[in-house]
Amino acid sequence: MMSFVPEFRDILRDQEPLAGYTSYGLGGPAQWLACPRTIDQVARLVGYCRGEGIPLYVLGLGANVLVSDEGVAGLVVRLNAPGFRHVDWPRPGSANGSGRRRQATNGDKVTIVAGGGADMHRLVLEAVRRGLEGVEGLAGIPGTLGGIIRMNAGGQWGQIADVVREVTVVDERGAMRHLPASEVGFSYRNTRLGDAVVCQAKLELRPGDPVALRERFMAIWEQKKRCQPLSEPSAGCVYKNPPGHRAGELIDRAGLKGKAIGGARISQLHANFIVTQEGATAEDVFSLIGETRRVVADRFGVELELEIKVWGRQRARSLEPAC
Ligand SMILES: Cc1cc2nc3c(=O)[nH]c(=O)nc-3n(C[C@H](O)[C@H](O)[C@H](O)COP(=O)(O)OP(=O)(O)OC[C@H]3O[C@@H](n4cnc5c(N)ncnc54)[C@H](O)[C@@H]3O)c2cc1C
């Protein structure tokens, strides 16, 4: 078995269970888990893994990842050191800040700089509190800024691409690069970032009316609470919406709402969510995905494409529609 050079020993754990780091709470261990403290350390880890042929995965809040029961062969990197969770807010009233007087008199842009491991929920709340407009439409979307950018997370009220100005990544060769938003390749729940690690980003917000912003945030949040099974473990929408369709609607029309395999069940509240109960395994979720894709393909001739990311060896075995 390969082993890591001594310089990484204090940021590495062997056979670290990943379930506790994901919103599903499922799956086996990572062969190695690393929590680097600096961008330079990320770059050295990526370069080392590339040189040794070790597969590398980046984990944010695990809100869109399903880890197989066997776990992940390779290195999982988590950007949860303080330097990656930090958000630099401009001082209120500064030239680039959100002082009330400036808000009232001009529409200047406000740039904030945040680490790839910054908690998006907190970032959104703080922006709303400061009366800064642009990310409130992401209310109720769990994740780190890096994961949110990698997935171009969003929905009917906006997506992260709307506010990203620049992204600092460590690319797959281990080189640090500053990419303007135009080079990120944002598309529907995707980017062209590939295996690059998002370490930092600049977001461009606008001064707005704090009361109106708070009301909008609350309205979105309330709507999500009504339509999504937020009190049960899930990874959000399992499938992307196929062109011209809504995945949840197809699953509902196929009569699959409430269908369960083992401890995994298609939510009654939102058919694009698979929720789990205690005792569920990743294999239960994989089987339910395979069955759903088969039924929807038979009934409507539509192939459901996964939005969630599946990690681990079981993927190939049980995700394919069983014919
Ligand atoms: C209840 C619930 C509701 C949700 N609602 C929505 C919604 O409305 N809209 C929506 O778009 N999504 C939604 N999601 C899915 C999820 O919130 C998003 O996909 C989010 O982007 C995941 O961020 P994360 O940090 O948890 O990334 P993870 O789930 O950890 O990872 C997701 C992908 O991003 C990559 N990644 C993570 N961090 C980095 C990084 N720093 N650099 C490079 N790549 C990285 C991972 O390798 C993986 O490929 C929901 C999820 C839940 C559980």
Image (cartoon, rainbow, N blue to C red):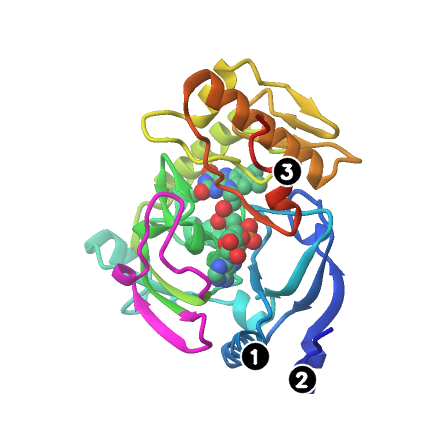
Residue lying at the far front of the rendered structure: 323
| Residue range (magenta) | 169-196
Q: Amino acid at mark 2?
A: Val
Task: Determine contact: label 3, label 2, CB under 8 Å.
Answer: no
Q: Nearer the viewer, residue 124 or 94?
A: 124
Secondary structure under the numbered disc 1 in the rendered image? helix
Would residue 193 be counted in the magenta stretch?
yes
Q: Which corner quadrant of the image does residue 249 belong to?
A: top left
Distance from mark 3 CB to nearest ligand 1 atom below 8 Å: no
Tell whether position 270 is magenta.
Answer: no
Is 317 above or below relative to 269?
below
Query: Which residue sits at x=30%, y=50%?
Result: 162
Residue 287 image position (x, y, % from top left): 65, 32
Query: Which is closer to the viewer, label 3 or label 2?
Result: 3
Q: Are marks 1 and 2 in contact (CB under 8 Å)?
A: yes
The amino acid beneath tag 1 is Tyr
- Mark count: 3
- Residue at image location 67% in from the left, 54% down from the top: 21
Disc 3 crowd rating (10 Å Cα; few below 14, some 14-19, many 20+) is: some
- On the image, the x and y values in percent for residue 104 come to 24, 52
Residue at numbered disc 2 = 5
SS assignment at label 3: helix
Three-letter code for the amino acid on which mark 3 is drawn: Ser
Is residue 95 shown left or right of residue 193?
left
Label 3, label 2: how far apart the Cα atoms are:
36 Å
- Mark 2 is surrounded, within 10 Å at the Cα level, by few (under 14), some (14 to 19) or many (20 or more) other residues, namely few
Instruction: Please give left or right for residue 42 compared with residue 114 in the image.
Output: right
> Which residue of the protein is positioned furthest toward the left in this rendering?
106
